[in-house]
Image (cartoon, grey):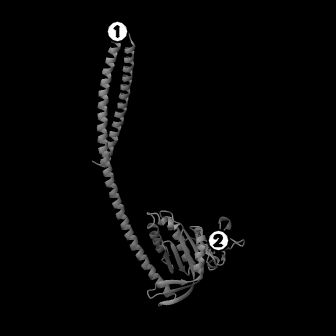
Amino acid sequence: MSLEEYKAQIDFLQKELLSLKQELEKELENKAKISAYVHNLTEQMQSSDETSNMNMLASEIASRQKADLRLGEQVATLEKKVYEKNKDLNRLLEIVRKKEEKNSQKQINQIKKVSEHFKKTEQERLETLQKINRELKKKQILERKIIAAVEKVEEYMFVLKADIKGYSKFMIDPDLRDYIPESFERIVNVNCAECFYYHITSGDSLLILDNSIVKICKSAFRIIEDLSELRGNPQIRMAIDFGKIVYSISEDSSIKVKTGDPLRIASRIEPLVTPNQVWISEEAKNHFPESKFAAVPLNPENLTLPFLETGELNIKKKDSTEEDIFLNIYQVLPVRKNNSEKD
């Protein structure tokens, strides 16, 4: 018998039980009324002195007691029926519970199987993307005319520093602590493959280097968009600066970032950024081709940050002993194309 058929039987039994219980309740009320009536007649008979009246009351009591006996038998029959129906109902409910438990376990196994397949596919995809990225890096290194391992390369580049807001709350959630960093890595690998350098640390901190601000901004906005579609709705802060970066290249063409002021400046700006926005320093803005993206001044009235009257923002790390660092900061926005300008 199918699960639906068992549930139909349960529904039918529950309706029968309800009807039987209503009938039983009615009979019990009638029995209580007769018992009260017999009690009243008995009191009348005991207080009466007339023989004829006493005989009439005794006859009425006997008649009522017979009716009470019949009702007692009916109540007993109904109680037995209720007991048997309850027994059948509990048996069917147990069958349904076991079947649903079996079906639930089957669904869990199917979901687990699909999840494992998806995870394997995603891992293969990540490995392919990483391989492509390594090849792109080699190509970009060759384009810079660097053909061997070099201990020190100095180059002016754009630097993006980003962190997921409230990452610690995802780490204490058993449903998200693996899902968020794994998804973030996949999203970064997909959207930063063309950038000269990118690296994730601690599961949520991202560094991107490239000499094209357009590449970096495209990657940034795609990462923001893809992250917003994940469970938990993670948000990310992004900051960009420009300047001289020192890095090295190993024999296998892997890049190691060493030093550079833009690394520090971008790291100072990033914690101040409104989540899911991209902010850029004035130095980076001065090398900013405003075709696909625009840099607009921040509005101090909308932000509770240490702005000067001149509009500069103090990006010094809170509670730090370092000197104040006042900079003009801008927000990066995509430039909307007119229909006639669309590709």
Residue at coordinates 36% horizontally, 36% vertically from top-left?
A: 18
Question: Quadrant location of residue 323?
Answer: bottom right
> Quadrant location of the C terminus?
bottom right
CB atoms of marks 2 and 1 within 8 Å: no
The front one of 267 and 47 is 47
Helix, strand or loop status at disc 1: helix
Which x, y percent locates residue 187? Answer: 47, 71
Quick check: 170 above or below 94?
below
Which x, y percent locates residue 177? Answer: 45, 66
Q: Nearer the viewer, mark 2 or mark 1?
A: 1
Quick check: 324 above or below 64?
below
Where is mark 1, residue-wise?
51
- Residue 336 appears left or right of 122: right
Q: Which mark is residue 338?
A: none
The front one of 159 and 171 is 171
**Total numbered labels:** 2
Where is mark 2, residue-wise?
296
The front one of 170 and 222 is 170
Q: Return the residue found at the far left.
A: 1
- Residue 142 appears left or right of 6: right
Could you tell me if residue 257 is visible in this image? yes
Question: Quadrant location of residue 86?
Answer: top left
Helix, strand or loop status at disc 2: strand
Q: Return the residue found at the far right.
A: 309
Q: Give, as a three-letter code, the residue at label 2.
A: Val
Which x, y percent locates residue 179? Answer: 44, 67
Could you tell me if residue 145 is visible in this image? no
Residue at coordinates 64% horizontally, 72% vertically from top-left?
A: 330
Q: Give, as a three-letter code, the residue at label 1.
A: Thr
Residue at coordinates 41% horizontally, 76% vertically from top-left?
A: 128
Residue at coordinates 50% horizontally, 71% vertically from top-left?
A: 204
